[in-house]
Image (cartoon, grey):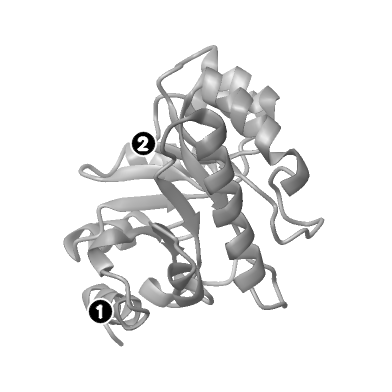
């Protein structure tokens, strides 16, 4: 069984083979479904950013583990905004004004990304690409908007979706008159394609830790 450190080294080598500098791409280690021991092994391997899908699971781990920057990468329900605001270094999954407003009532300095459903799949969360500009403008007025996040399609070639997200980001920068430095796109199955398309942040679980145990 390979170690997390060995898997991380392999990931960075794969990023380098796309022509990008691995140092320009932040790796979010997705620890959802893994216990605190796996989180500690990630930190020991040099992975400082940990990603969780559920607020409560993340808060439970935060109480046990020091030294991590935690990202919320799963859908945030409005009624959980009070628990999440100010607890995460970055909330990547803002997909409505209601959620942004709920966070802003607690902490206007919360760093966030707007999630865009460029895959156009009903089971995925995220704002429709046609409404992304409107939501980006609204969120930027309420919170510390840092960029955009998306998931690639489940079956189709993810390149068009990733290219579209980059285009939406570029248009949003012109709209806002400032930089949106984070493009969070790419997971274990497609991160090399995402990095080649301009991703600055990838969300990796299985490629680092192996498969999660069945629940």
Q: Is residue 43 above or below residue 84?
A: below
Label 1: few (<14), some (14–19) or many (≥20) C-alpha neighbours in 10 Å: some
Label 2: few (<14), some (14–19) or many (≥20) C-alpha neighbours in 10 Å: some
Q: Is residue 46 above or below residue 48?
A: below
Q: Quadrant of the C terminus?
A: bottom right
Residue 116, numbered label = none
Residue at 45 percent across and 63 percent down: it is 198
In the displayed image of the protein, which residue is found farthest to the right? 122
Residue at 31 percent across and 57 percent down: it is 39
Q: Pointers 2 and 1 in contact (CB under 8 A)?
A: no
* Mark 1 secondary-structure assignment: loop
Q: Quadrant of the N terminus?
A: bottom left
User: 138 and 69: which one is in front?
Assistant: 138
* Mark 2 secondary-structure assignment: loop
Describe residue 82's horizontal placement relative to residue 34 as left or right: right
Q: Residue 102, located in which quarter of the rendered image?
A: top right
User: 90 and 148: which one is in front?
Assistant: 148
Q: Residue 38, located in which quarter of the rendered image?
A: bottom left
Describe residue 198's horizontal placement relative to residue 94 as left or right: left
Q: Which residue is mark 2?
A: 89
In x, y percent, where is residue 94? 60, 36
Residue at 54 percent across and 46 percent down: it is 169
Alpha-carbon span between mark 2 and mark 1: 26 Å
**Pointer 2 or 1: first along the chain:** 1
Number of numbered discs present?
2
| Res 113 visible | no
Q: Which residue is mark 1?
A: 3
Q: Is residue 215 above or below residue 190?
A: above
| Res 163 visible | yes
Residue at 63 percent across and 59 percent down: it is 164
């Amino acid at each position: 069984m390979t170690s997390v450190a060995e898997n991380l080294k392999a990931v960075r080598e794969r990023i380098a083979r796309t022509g990008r500098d691995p140092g320009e791409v932040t790796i979010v280690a997705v620890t959802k479904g893994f216990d605190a021991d796996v989180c500690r092994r990630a930190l020991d391997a040099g992975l400082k950013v940990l990603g969780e899908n559920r607020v409560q699971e993340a808060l439970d781990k935060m109480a046990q583990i020091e030294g991590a920057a935690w990202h919320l990468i799963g859908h945030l329900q409005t009624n959980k905004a009070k628990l999440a605001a100010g607890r995460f270094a970055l909330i990547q999954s803002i997909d409505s004004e209601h959620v942004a407003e709920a966070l802003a009532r607690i902490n206007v300095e919360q760093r966030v990304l707007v999630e865009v459903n460029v895959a156009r799949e009903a089971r995925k969360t995220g704002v429709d690409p046609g409404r992304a500009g409107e939501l980006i403008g609204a969120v930027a007025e309420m919170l510390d908007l840092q960029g955009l996040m998306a998931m690639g399609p489940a079956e189709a070639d993810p390149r068009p979706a990733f290219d579209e997200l980059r285009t939406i980001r570029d248009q949003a920068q012109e709209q806002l008159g400032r930089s949106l430095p984070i493009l969070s796109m790419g997971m274990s199955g497609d991160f090399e394609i995402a990095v080649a398309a301009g991703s600055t942040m990838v969300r990796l679980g299985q490629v680092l830790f192996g498969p999660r145990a069945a629940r």
